[in-house]
Structures are given as structure tokens and as C-alpha cells.
């Protein structure tokens, strides 16, 4: 599939170039004069990388995403070679074959479609998702499922978006721009969940199906512990979206809700919970343990950026569904109130990194590092007077 997709890009460029061959002499001139040794070497390297991509489809030891990224860079260099050696004055109308090739074979950037609610305070929701994608190098598109009036003090009002319009937003994106990864946030009702699931199935073209991922952040429980969704919505998420999910990222209260209230009081409990959630359909499950101290009855739990407290460390558990193998992600405790939107940001960061081509464990590791860095960089900020402080998503390039 990878080979066909990449050859499709090359073929589209060749077809477009052939169309211009009869209009002017640029194509013939390029073919006879600019097939240099450097160009032939690049073509040979491209063919070698294509072979590796084919091997990656059947061999998990070879990172397909990284090879595709390398091939995309080589392809750009190859076209750059064409542009450099094409004569912009060739042909009667000054047609530049190199520019025509670039237009015909535009490289698609990593894309993430975000289906979630809007946060007017800019700390969470769609706003946080888009900032995280931009910071990590992915192009984000959106389908807004709800509008909220909120700030650092909390949520003051919610305005639901008509289901038909949510679906229209998704169609508009998927039928034209396409996507590599879909990231979902809060989906407030079973009707919304069913509509999103149906849109994902209908909007997945044959050319994308081999690559598209779904990162599902099951926003079900508020920071204060209030259940945000009705039971029928929770059931719809489990039945309709879990089987499509590449990875889900529940916190501990959400994990308990998904497992019918089963208590979780240790890292071992988190591992078993992750394995049981994998049995519901997701390929991977990341259980975030930021509430573990509360689950253990410790009222003095510290802010940890979304991970379980164990001594002076914070721990998240990632489980691979096919093997049941669990991996722990540890980080130091971070004492701050600027953690509003950490769940949204972590999930969208994972989505961006998957779109770029990272494996799931590598995407989680890098996303955790990015979120932890954002929390540290935001500890001194004065954004609002409430307990839900926003983060500096641009901390890698802008220090406030």
C-alpha cells in the first residue's frame, strides 16, 4: 500500500509533465539534458527506500513512518533538482517544467482532524489541540462538536452544535483535505458519538485506510470528579469508537467508569485495567494515573501533569492490545495549577506524532515530554485568577 501511494505521487507528476510535452519542448529538453548522475542516484535511493517501505508493511521492526518521512524528503530533493535544472524560459510561453512537477506532485504534510469542543479560554479543547499539533509539526483541521464559554474559573455555558453540522464539517475536511489521524475529544451525547463514528467509516477512502489512525480521548469525568456523559453515551463510545481506535487515553476516573466502577489503587491495577480496555477494541490503551493518590485515599495529591504518583515519580501505563505487554512512562512531579488542558494536549500531541510517522510508544514518549515541558514553562504565568491555569503550548519557541 505504501509503495502504491508513493508511486501514485510520482505517476501524477509524470502524467502532468507528459501533458506539457506537446505544448513546448521543456519535457524533451529536461529528459535529454538534465538526467544527471546526481538525479539517477536519487532515483536509485528512492527505489531502495520503497523496498524498505514494502518490508515495513510486514516487518514491525522497521519503522515505516520514519522511512516514509525520509522518502518524502528525498522526493522533494529530486523535484528540487528538476527545478534547479529546468529552464524557466523554455517553450513559447516561458513554461517551467520543474514548477509544473512541483504543482502536480505536492507533498502532503502530516494531517490531524480534531473532533472536539471549543474552549473560549484557550487552555483546552480545540484550541489546545491545534496549538499542540502546530508545535509538533502537524497540520490540523477541525470539526467543532460544542461551543463553551469558559475561563480559568470554570465553564459558564455550553452551546451544542447540531449533529448534522458536525457531520458536514467532517465531510468537508475528509472529502477534500483528507487526514492521517483523527483525534476526538468530548462527544457529549450518544447521538454525537454515533454520527462521528459513521462519518469516520464513510469518510475513509481506500487510499487512506492503510495509514489512518484514531486517537480517542474519552472525556467523561471532569477534574472535580463529575461525570460529564450519560450512560448511553459511554456505551456508544465503547461500542462504536473503541473498535476503530488506534489508542485511547483515559485518566483513572474515566478508566473506572469504563470498567463499571472497578477500583484502581495501584500500578498493577492500572496494568490490568489497560489490558481489559484493550479487549474492548483499541489497539493500544494509555491509562493516565494522575488521580492515583485520590484513589488510594490521599487527599494531598499533587499535580502531576496526568500521571500516577509513586514516590517522587509520576507514572502512566501503556498497553499493547495484541500482546498485553505494558510499558511505564515515568516523570518527575510538577507542582503547579497550570495543568488545564493537559489531557487534550497529550492526546493531540500523540495524534500529531503518529501523523508524522512515529510508532505508538515513541509518540507517547515524545508527547509526554512535550506536555511536561509545557507545564514547567507555564508555572510562573498569570493567566486568569481561577484554579485552571492554561499552559504555554509554544514553550519550545517562545518563552514568556
Image: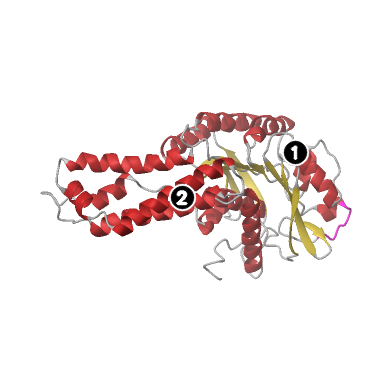
Q: Nearer the viewer, mark 2 or mark 1?
A: 2
The x and y percentages for residue 2 are 48, 41
Label 1 SS: helix
- Specify the segment rendered in magenta: 296-301
Which dot marks residue 49?
2
The x and y percentages for residue 340 are 66, 56
Which dot marks residue 8?
none
Looking at the image, which is closer to me, 115 or 319? 319
The x and y percentages for residue 243 are 65, 33
Which dot marks residue 277?
1
Looking at the image, which is closer to me, 326 or 166? 326
Would residue 163 be seen by someone viewing this image from the given angle?
no
* 43, above or below 213, in the image: below
Check if residue 379 falls in the magenta segment: no
Magenta segment main secondary structure: loop
* 11, above or below 155, in the image: above
Looking at the image, which is closer to me, 4 or 318? 4
Task: Estimate the spatial distance between the alpha carbons at disc 2 and disc 1, rounded to whole Å.
Answer: 37 Å
Which colour assignment does the render follow? secondary structure
Residue at far right of view: 297
Give the residue displayed 13% in from the left and 49% down from the top.
Answer: 91
Mark 1 residue crowding within 10 angstroms, few (<14) / some (14–19) / many (20+)? many
Residue at far left of view: 92
Amino acid at each position: 500500500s505504501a509503495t502504491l501511494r508513493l508511486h501514485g505521487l510520482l505517476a501524477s507528476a509524470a502524467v502532468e509533465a507528459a501533458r506539457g510535452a506537446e505544448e513546448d519542448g521543456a519535457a524533451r529538453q529536461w529528459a535529454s539534458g538534465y538526467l544527471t548522475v546526481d538525479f539517477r542516484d536519487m532515483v536509485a535511493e528512492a527505489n531502495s527506500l520503497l523496498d524498505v517501505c514494502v518490508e515495513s508493511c510486514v516487518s514491525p521492526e522497521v519503522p515505516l513512518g520514519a522511512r516514509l518521512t525520509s522518502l518524502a524528503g528525498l522526493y522533494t530533493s529530486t523535484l528540487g533538482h528538476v527545478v534547479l535544472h529546468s529552464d524557466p524560459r523554455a517553450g513559447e510561453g516561458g513554461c517551467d517544467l520543474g514548477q509544473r512537477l512541483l504543482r502536480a506532485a505536492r507533498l502532503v504534510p502530516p494531517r490531524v482532524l480534531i473532533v472536539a469542543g471549543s474552549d473560549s479560554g484557550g487552555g483546552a479543547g480545540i484550541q489546545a489541540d491545534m496549538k499542540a499539533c502546530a508545535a509538533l509539526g502537524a497540520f490540523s483541521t477541525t470539526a467543532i462538536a460544542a461551543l463553551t464559554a469558559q475561563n480559568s474559573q470554570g465553564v459558564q455555558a455550553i452551546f451544542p452544535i447540531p449533529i448534522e453540522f458536525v457531520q458536514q464539517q467532517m465531510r468537508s475536511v475528509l472529502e477534500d483535505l483528507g487526514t492521517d489521524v483523527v483525534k476526538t475529544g468530548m462527544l457529549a451525547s450518544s447521538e454525537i458519538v454515533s454520527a462521528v463514528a459513521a462519518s469516520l467509516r464513510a469518510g475513509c477512502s481506500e487510499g487512506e485506510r492503510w495509514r489512518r489512525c484514531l486517537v480517542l480521548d474519552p472525556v467523561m469525568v471532569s477534574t472535580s470528579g463529575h461525570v460529564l456523559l450519560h450512560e448511553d453515551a459511554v456505551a456508544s463510545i465503547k461500542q462504536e469508537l473503541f473498535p476503530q481506535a488506534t489508542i485511547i487515553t483515559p485518566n483513572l476516573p474515566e478508566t473506572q467508569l469504563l470498567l463499571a466502577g472497578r477500583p484502581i489503587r495501584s500500578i498493577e491495577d492500572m496494568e490490568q485495567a489497560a489490558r481489559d480496555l484493550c479487549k474492548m477494541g483499541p489497539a493500544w490503551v494509555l491509562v493516565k494515573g494522575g488521580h492515583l493518590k485520590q484513589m488510594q485515599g490521599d487527599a494531598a495529591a499533587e499535580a502531576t501533569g496526568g500521571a500516577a504518583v509513586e514516590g517522587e515519580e509520576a507514572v502512566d501505563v501503556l498497553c499493547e492490545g495484541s500482546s498485553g505487554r505494558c510499558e511505564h512512562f515515568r516523570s518527575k512531579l510538577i507542582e503547579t495549577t497550570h495543568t488545564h488542558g493537559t489531557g487534550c494536549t497529550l492526546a493531540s500531541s500523540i495524534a500529531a506524532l503518529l501523523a508524522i510517522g512515529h510508532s505508538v510508544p515513541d509518540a507517547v514518549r515524545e508527547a509526554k515530554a512535550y506536555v511536561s515541558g509545557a507545564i514547567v514553562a507555564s508555572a510562573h504565568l498569570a493567566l486568569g485568577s481561577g484554579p485552571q491555569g492554561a499552559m504555554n503550548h509554544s514553550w519550545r519557541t517562545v518563552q514568556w
